[in-house]
Amino acid sequence: MASSNLTPTLSAAQCRAARALLDWPADELASRARVPGTWLEAFEQGAEPGGDDDPGETARLRRTLEAAGVEFLDSGLASAGGGPGLRVRAPADYIPAEQLNSANDG
């Protein structure tokens, strides 16, 4: 069995959308995921970045985005259209406006 079947995928569109939801410029994601900026740019444009000396780039991108709160909905998972998508989890320290009060002032 190929290891690529065991690794969740990340599409160029999901990567661009996740960055937009987090309001991260490309250089921030590249730095956090430890991938070359030129590689990320090519990946997000849908090109197969050449000379893949490190096949773990997309896995690092996905792990980095997941650590920042992005949840990926792979094709076939519960979503309105049934296709791949994503959403952002609320940060652990997030308090909805209707629950704000003096008891949880930081």
Image (cartoon, rainbow, N blue to C red):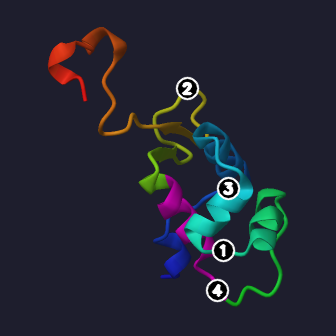
Residue under label 2: 80
Residue 23: percent from the left, percent from the top? 64, 41
Residue under label 1: 35
Pointers 4 and 2 in contact (C-beta within 8 Å): no
Q: Quadrant of the C terminus?
A: top left
Image position of 67 (left or right of 56): left
Quadrant in the rendering for residue 85: top right
Q: Earlier in the sequence, mark 1 or mark 3?
A: 3
- The crowd level at tag 1 (other Cα within 10 Å; few <14, some 14-19, many 20+) is some
Q: Earlier in the sequence, mark 1 or mark 2?
A: 1
Q: Amino acid at mark 4?
A: Asp
Residue lying at 51% horizontally and 71% vertically, measured from the top left: 5
Residue under label 4: 54
Q: Amino acid at mark 1?
A: Val
Residue 59: percent from the left, percent from the top? 54, 69
Number of disc labels: 4
Magenta highlight range = 54-65
Q: Earlier in the sequence, mark 4 or mark 1?
A: 1
Answer above or below: position of 86 versus 9. above
Residue under label 3: 11
